Amino acid sequence: MDEDAGSMERIFNNGAGAIVTKSIGLKPRKGYPNPTVIELEHGILNAIGLPNPGIENFKDEIIKLKKINIPVIGSIFGTDSEEFVTLAEKMQNYGVDALELNMSCPHAKGYGLEIGCDPDLVKEITLNVKKSTNIPVFVKISPNLANIVEIAKSAEEGNADGIVAINTLKAMKIDIEMQMPVLSNKIGGYSGNAIKPIGIRCVYEISKNIDIPVIGVGGITTGIDAIEYFMAGASSVQVGSAIYQRGLDVFKKICDEIKIWMENHRYNNISDLVGVAHK
């Protein structure tokens, strides 16, 4: 799905509470050649390569969304602290309500995971972005790390307002007839149903060790999935791959399923569910 203001508006009108943009960099980026996305039995494997129009060309899409009062979280990626700060300032000036620092893309060289595995760099970038902006800053981190809790703590020390966990898992698919990797980039990121248990584990471990909110991501297709994330410690959730699996109305379905479960179990507020599995 092309991510322009029109498509993001349709997602919001179908029940999403806010919209997270595609990750935007300083300059236009074409990404990798096809094939870049394949649907597997239990999820989606992609190596798109962070394609985006560049921050200057994305300005109008954000402005269109803000004119109709849709909450927007601007996702950005860069190679160093200076790039992140420049992007953050521009996103804020364009009117986004919050920022998501993508430090966890598993297949784009020089970006994402190569930055997000260094605790000192995560802290430095987060601190500098916070100093240069006055809107909430969330740091999106990777499950492809042995020190995921340490990285989350580094973001917290950098004054992040929340952690987004998780991004996709590093993965690949081989065509046994062609005897070669299916994706043009060979290695991609795996999302969808299959990664939910990993996302749950990461949210559980992170939320036990930090004091800022955690946004749960990974394999959420139903209201029951979302509730499991809440119980693991997530204060809110993001939905991505489920759009392909259940359609644009997946957001309304998830919200309705959450409401029904809570009514049946006599819960009045989602906040009452957050972290209950830690007890």
Image (cartoon, helix red, strand yellow):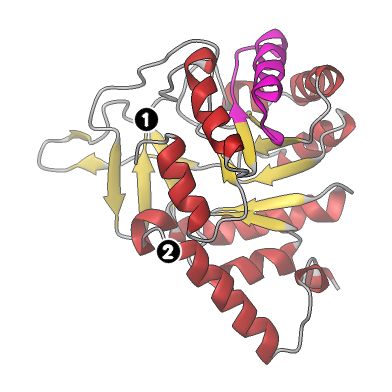
**Whole-number angstrom distance, CA of label 2 to CA of label 1:** 25 Å
In the rendered image, the quadrant that contains the N terminus is top left
Q: Residue at the location (76% across, 61% down)?
A: 233
User: Disc 2 designates what residue?
Assistant: 249
Provide the residue span drawn in magenta: 75-99
Tell me, for residue 64, which label it has, or none.
Answer: none
Q: Of the residues under marks 2 and 1, which one precedes in the sequence?
A: 1
In the displayed structure, 156 sits above or below 70; it is above
Q: Residue under label 1, please give it.
A: 48
**Quadrant, the C terminus:** bottom right
Residue at the image position 82 percent from the left and 68 percent from the top: 278
Assign a secondary structure to mark 1. Answer: loop
Residue 93 lies in the magenta stretch: yes
Residue type indicated by callout 2? Asp
Badge 2: residue crowd in 10 Å (few <14, some 14–19, many ≥20): some
Name the spot of residue 271 as percent of width and height, x first. 81, 68
**Marks 2 and 1 in Cβ contact (< 8 Å):** no
Element carrying mark 2? loop
133 sits to left or right of 77: right
**Residue 240 visible from this viewpoint:** no
Label count reads 2
Q: Is residue 128 left or right of residue 109?
A: right
The vertical placement of 99 against 260, above or below, is above
Residue 118 sits inside the magenta stretch = no
Of residue 241 and residue 263, the one placed in the foreground of this image is 263
Q: In the image, what residue occupies the spot 54% across and 21% down?
A: 59
Residue nearest the viewer, comparing 16 with 226? 16
Res 84 → quadrant = top right
Q: Amino acid at mark 1?
A: Ile
Q: Percent x, y for residue 263?
A: 68, 87
144 or 235, which lies in front?
A: 235
